[in-house]
């Protein structure tokens, strides 16, 4: 598999880092996410940790985007609090992001190795929910 990298949206990383720095407090909110919508807007969100499991920042961002009328996301990034930098999406988030936005670009990596790659390359040989739905009769 050859990874195709794309330009890195530094403004998106800065937006997520700002939210992580200013809105993540305590153990309940430790990750921030930012996404660029199809119309150019940046939408941000934080995770909602709970011992029973809770939505990651990327999943909260999907709902936040929809609530703001941004249904098409082009690029997403997650950043950890306490200056942890860019954090790749977990497996659950990768699957959900792929199902919602199959053309999504994801910013991953650390330090000088930050890059933008298609969600399909983060989840190779993946199950795509839409591909397995029966057509209406």
Image (cartoon, rainbow, N blue to C red):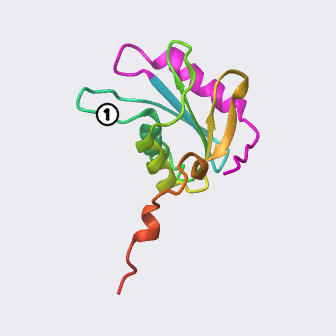
* The stretch drawn in magenta includes residue 7: yes
Residue lying furthest right: 7
Pinpoint residue 17: horizontal percent, then vertical percent. 58, 21
Residue at the farthest left position: 52
Task: Tell me the residue at 51%/53% (across/down).
Answer: 98
Give the percent coordinates (x, y) of residue 54. Answer: 31, 33
Which image quadrant: the C terminus? bottom left
Give whichever of 112, 68 is nearer the camera. Answer: 112
Kindly identify which residue carries mark 1: 54
The structure residue drawn at horizontal position 61% and vertical position 27%, both measured from the top left corner, is: 15
Question: Which image quarter: residue 108?
Answer: top right
Q: Is residue 37 above or below residue 11?
A: below
Residue located at (44% from left, 49% from top): 96
* Res 36 visible: no
Indicate left or right for 2 with 99 as reference: right
Q: Count the numbered circles shown.
A: 1
User: In what element is the residue under mark 1?
Assistant: loop
Residue sitting farthest toward the bottom: 137
The crowding category of the residue bearing disc 1, from other C-alpha atoms within 10 Å (few below 14, some 14 to 19, many at least 20), is few
74 up-or-down from 9: above or below: below
Residue 25 in sight from this viewpoint:
yes
> Magenta stretch containing residue 18, yes or no?
yes
**Residue range (magenta):** 1-30
- In the picture, measured across the screen, residue 64 lies left or right of residue 137, that is right
The percent position of residue 35, horizontal first and vertical second, equals: 58, 39
Identity of the residue drawn at 33% across and 27% down: 49
The picture places residue 18, in percent across and down from the top left corner, at 58, 20
Closer to the camera, 137 or 110? 110
Q: Nearer the viewer, residue 84 or 24?
A: 84
């Amino acid at each position: 598999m050859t990874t195709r990298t794309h330009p890195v949206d530094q403004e998106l990383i800065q937006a997520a880092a700002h939210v992580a720095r200013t809105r993540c407090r305590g153990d309940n909110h430790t990750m921030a996410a930012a996404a660029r919508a199809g119309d150019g807007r940046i939408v941000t969100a934080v995770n909602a940790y709970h011992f029973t499991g809770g939505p990651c920042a990327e999943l909260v961002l999907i709902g936040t985007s929809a609530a703001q009328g941004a249904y098409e996301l082009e690029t997403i990034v997650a950043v950890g609090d306490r200056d942890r930098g860019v954090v790749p999406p977990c497996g659950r988030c990768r699957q959900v992001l792929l199902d919602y936005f199959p053309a999504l670009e994801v910013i991953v990596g650390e330090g000088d190795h930050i890059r933008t790659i298609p969600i399909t390359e983060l989840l190779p040989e993946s199950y795509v929910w839409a591909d397995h739905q029966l057509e209406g009769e």
